Image (tube, rainbow, N blue to C red):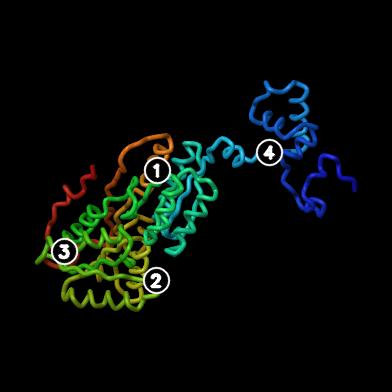
Amino acid sequence: MTIPAHDRSLPDRALAGFPSRITISDVALKAGVSKATVSRFLNRRQELLTPEIALRVEQAIAALGYTPSPMAQALKRGRSRLIGLVVADVTNPFSVAVLRGAERACQDAGYLLMLFNLGNESGREREAIEALSSYQVEGLILNTLGRDDGALAKAVLHGKPVVLVDRRHSEMQTDFVSIDNAGAVRVAAAHLLSAGYRELLFVSEPVTGVSSRLEREAAFRVFVADHAGEVAGRTFESTAEGTQALDEALQALRARAGAGTPAVLSSNAVISLRVAAAAARLGWRFGVDLGLVGFDETEWAPLIGPGLSTIAQPTDDLGRLAASCLLERLNGLELPPRQILLAGRLIERGSSRAAPAPDRIRVNTDAILKPVS
């Protein structure tokens, strides 16, 4: 088989039947011009070319089916139009919902979003920053574990604007977008107290080093302290492997409640599912044997038992605002770091129906539900 002259510059793998990407060199060889001439044509600078040369380049491009690399063209202009997003755990519904909001905002502005999932492995934070930076992302949206300040400092050293979502980092002074964790916990706990639940358990994934978990747990303790004599509460940290420990914690909660009905406030959807599985193992019914309000509204929340009461986070707005803040920085906005806190919304279902205890305390939640300014 004879290889046409313009194809002789292709890699040897093309001879073995493997497809090879056509390059600007191939186009130049086919048209009988220099690579600089092809580059001028591709950058719409035909005024620097004669009509005859421009036509030869155009015909060569059509004959070879050449498509310019968007990345290469963007880098020549100094802009990749890429935004990096790092999430702690893509299996968490919160991360997926934030991703959707951020992606829409980026697309509307002509940017593409690149995702790096840590899989809850804190040791990969540095790897995530370095990997995305190697693709010349223009900025970073971070929802990381926050246990490697060195990795985050590396992002700053790359000179890229950064926006944090949901999780703060003490070493970084940058824009931060989150739900108002303290306000949302007050809403959930006040709802349970109003419904007659006097013995509460706050169940969370391990809180150390994760700001959102720390804020929620701290707000729960403050609520219990503020309502001493009306309600009692403790915290339990749940792990994926600790199913027996969670069962035992719920049984101890039930014992402390005595004749009353206890309730759980779960810190996210992952924990809500673990508590639902534990209740099933124990043969308990939500709203009868155990009350529950959980962070994160999901598609399956209405389908478990009588329906799970939730604190719905404005996840789409969080992702959209994080992307908008980053895009503003990329467009030259210079302001002190901003903190944007959005209010959560209580969705009442059967899992937090009024407890069977005879006397219930009414808590005014109107002020608590006001959005954060």
- Residue 224, disc: 3
Amino acid at dot 2: Ala
Callout count: 4
SS state under label 4: loop
Question: Badge 2 local density, few (<14 within 10 Å), some, or many (20+)?
Answer: few
Q: Quadrant of residue 317?
A: top left
Q: Earlier in the sequence, mark 3 or mark 1?
A: 3
**Residue on which the image places disc 2:** 240
- Looking at the image, the residue that sits furthest to the front is 157
Above or below 143: residue 264: below
The numbered mark at residue 67 is: 4
Q: Is residue 256 placed above or below 345 in the rendered structure?
A: below
Of the numbered discs 2 and 3, the one sitting upstream in the chain is 3
Amino acid found under the numbered disc labelled 3: Val
2 or 1: tag closer to the N-terminus: 2
Q: Residue furthest right?
A: 1
Query: Could you classify mark 1 by the number of other residues whose Cα lies within 10 Å: few (under 14), some (14-19), or many (20 or more)?
Result: many
